[in-house]
Image (spheres, rainbow, N blue to C red):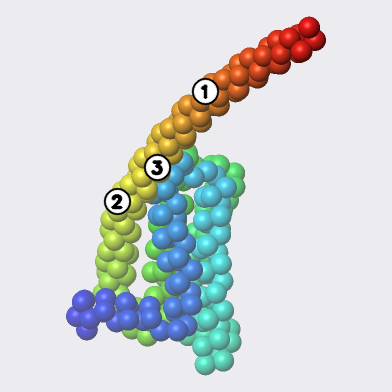
């Protein structure tokens, strides 16, 4: 089978129901992280995030071991019969366990842990092993190269998605600032208008007060005349 046929076959495998249920959470988590850090570009993940990401590999590997165990209802004998798939799942479990310890105890420098335990690295690695375990294609060098190409291709696509995500959120922020400025100007105009209305009311009250005082004086004058 040609290399591109193997790649197409693996990609088609992604949309089979049993595989899709495993892949959807990984895709959703990756896209959500891309959007989140596109929105909060000045924020950096911490050790707690790296620790959580390493758990993904453990959970995925346990699911894959369960799948291998359930093939044809043969049970544990499948771990011998499907040796390469079993080794891949165990390898994923081992890597997840190592990363879990490294991130829990902060063994690696954070700049290394940031890339090794990033959602992109973790989720794409898990995706590749999922395809390998569920595939019925021969486990050979062609399979390995195909998986590497798929992972690299998806990595490029997800990284390219970061650009429009950042631009979108920057545009939203600019519009929010413009709207805030417009609201401030509108509020300022309303305050000025209220001040003008208040001054007009003050003038009106002064006029009424002055008129009342004049009437009072006139009444007193008339009272004096009547008294005389």
Query: Foreground: 58 or 74?
Result: 58
Element type at marker 2?
Answer: helix
Q: Residue at x 61, y 19 (%)?
A: 211
Q: Earlier in the sequence, mark 2 or mark 3?
A: 2
Are the residues tagged 1 and 2 within 8 Å (C-beta)? no
Q: Is residue 108 visible?
A: yes
Q: Residue furthest right?
A: 227
Q: Which mark is residue 179?
A: 3
Image quadrant where residue 119 sits: bottom left
The CA span between labels 2 and 3 is 24 Å
Disc 1 is placed on an element classified as: helix
- Residue on which disc 2 sits: 163
Q: Residue at x 55, y 24 (%)?
A: 204
Quadrant where the N terminus sits is: bottom left
Q: Position of residue 14 (x, y in %)?
A: 38, 78
Left or right side of 167 for 29: right
In front: label 2 or label 3: 3
Q: CA distance from mark 1 to mark 3?
A: 30 Å
Residue 188 screen position, x and y as percent: 45, 31
Q: Secondary structure at mark 3?
A: helix
Q: Which residue is mark 1?
A: 199
Distance in Å between CA atoms under marks 1 and 2: 54 Å
């Amino acid at each position: 089978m040609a290399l591109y046929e193997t790649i197409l076959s693996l990609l088609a495998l992604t949309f089979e129901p049993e595989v899709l249920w495993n892949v959807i959470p990984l895709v959703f988590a990756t896209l959500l992280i891309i959007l989140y850090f596109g929105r909060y570009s000045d924020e950096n993940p911490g050790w707690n995030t790296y620790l959580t990401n390493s758990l993904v590999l453990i959970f995925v590997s346990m699911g894959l071991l369960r799948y291998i165990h359930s093939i044809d209802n043969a049970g544990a004998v499948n771990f011998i019969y499907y040796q390469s798939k079993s080794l891949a799942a165990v390898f994923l479990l081992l890597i997840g366990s190592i990363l879990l310890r490294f991130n829990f105890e902060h063994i690696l420098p954070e700049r290394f842990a940031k890339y090794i335990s990033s959602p992109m690295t973790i989720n794409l690695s898990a995706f590749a092993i999922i395809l390998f375990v569920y595939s019925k294609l021969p486990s050979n060098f062609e399979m390995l190269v195909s998986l590497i190409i798929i992972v690299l291709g998806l990595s490029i696509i997800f990284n390219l998605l970061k650009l429009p995500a950042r631009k979108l959120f920057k545009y939203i922020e600019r519009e929010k600032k413009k709207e805030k400025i417009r609201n401030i100007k509108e509020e300022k105009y309303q305050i000025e208008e209220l001040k003008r209305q208040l001054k007009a009311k003050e003038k009106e009250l002064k006029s009424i007060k002055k008129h009342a005082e004049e009437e009072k004086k006139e009444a007193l004058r008339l009272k004096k005349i009547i008294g005389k």
